């Protein structure tokens, strides 16, 4: 049911084990700018994806960023919260005006996927057709203020839902009543492999760099220096990317 909903309807996946971190302080944007691959000079209501890489340009984490009025909310893969927290903490210099906090306990995290996801959200909360890619806004679902961010989904629209933890049950119940089907891990991974979407711990590891993993669009060429930037620039300039993420469809 979850698989079919992801292909032709709306599927709801609980991502409560995914990392949720808060980056505050007046230097927060400059800090993330110097340690990750994309341009994160965002206005409130905007978002993007950026990659933390090692000095040798190997992937440490892929971060989805939501620019809030008072700080940056960072989302990453399952079980990655402590490692990312420690990585970021070691990059904070003594004169950086940066505050780092975990938000896993305060916010429940769900992913709404499938070609009917936008229509279902419109039914329960209001239209989202004008929401730009990676942009976010607050919508009321079951009387609860929910942060909704559009993302690339799998083969169609996807939406991240960040819900105050005490209200998660009420919000997800409203979405299921409206027609969403639960999407469990096995079906999700089939859907994402079919769509060619890499995932942390599978294709996104420290064995590859962002260019090899199909994340070129999240590596900005004009933002200046960041950790691992020289290697990425050299591979782009001299066309030295020799490994690529591809899908194979056997005849049998």
Image (cartoon, rainbow, N blue to C red):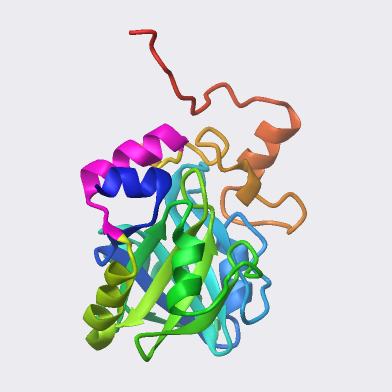
Residue 83 in the image, given as x and y percentages of width and height = 31, 61
Residue 154 in the image, given as x and y percentages of width and height = 46, 46
Say if 117 sits above or below 173 in the image.
above
Q: In which quarter of the image is residue 175?
A: bottom left
Number of callouts: 0
Residue 188 in magenta? yes
Residue at position x 42%, y 66% in the image: 75
Q: Residue furthest top?
A: 251
Say if 169 sits above or below 207 in the image.
below
Q: In this view, does 122 lie to the left or right of 233?
A: left
Q: Quadrant of the C terminus?
A: top left
Q: In this view, does 59 lie to the left or right of 4?
A: right
Residue 98 in the image, given as x and y percentages of width and height = 50, 83
Nearest the viewer among 32 and 203 is: 203
Residue 166 in the image, given as x and y percentages of width and height = 23, 87
Nearest the viewer among 209 and 130 is: 130
Specify start and end residues of the magenta stretch as a single range.
181-196
Residue 98 seen in render: no
């Amino acid at each position: 049911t979850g698989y079919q909903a992801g292909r032709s309807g709306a599927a709801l996946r609980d991502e409560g084990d995914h990392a949720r971190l808060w980056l505050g302080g007046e230097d927060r944007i400059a800090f993330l700018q110097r340690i990750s691959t994309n341009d994160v000079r965002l206005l409130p209501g905007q978002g993007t994806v950026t990659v933390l890489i090692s000095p040798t340009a190997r992937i440490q984490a892929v971060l989805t960023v939501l620019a809030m009025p008072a700080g940056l909310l960072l989302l990453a893969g399952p079980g990655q919260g402590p490692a990312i927290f420690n990585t970021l903490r070691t990059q904070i210099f003594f004169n950086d005006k940066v505050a780092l906090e975990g938000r896993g306990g305060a916010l429940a995290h769900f992913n709404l996927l499938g070609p009917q996801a936008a229509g279902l959200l419109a039914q329960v909360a209001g239209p989202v057709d004008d929401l730009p890619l990676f942009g976010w806004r607050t919508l009321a679902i079951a009387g609860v203020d929910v942060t909704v961010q559009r993302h690339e989904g799998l083969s169609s629209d996807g939406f991240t839902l960040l819900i105050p933890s005490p209200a998660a049950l009420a919000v997800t119940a409203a979405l299921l009543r409206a027609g969403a089907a639960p999407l469990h891990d096995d079906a999700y991974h089939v859907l994402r492999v079919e769509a060619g979407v890499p995932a942390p711990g599978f294709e996104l590891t420290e064995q590859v760099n962002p260019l090899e993993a199909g994340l070129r669009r999240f590596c900005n060429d004009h933002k200046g220096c960041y950790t691992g930037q020289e290697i990425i620039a050299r591979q782009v300039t001299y066309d030295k990317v020799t490994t690529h993420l591809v899908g194979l469809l056997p005849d049998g």
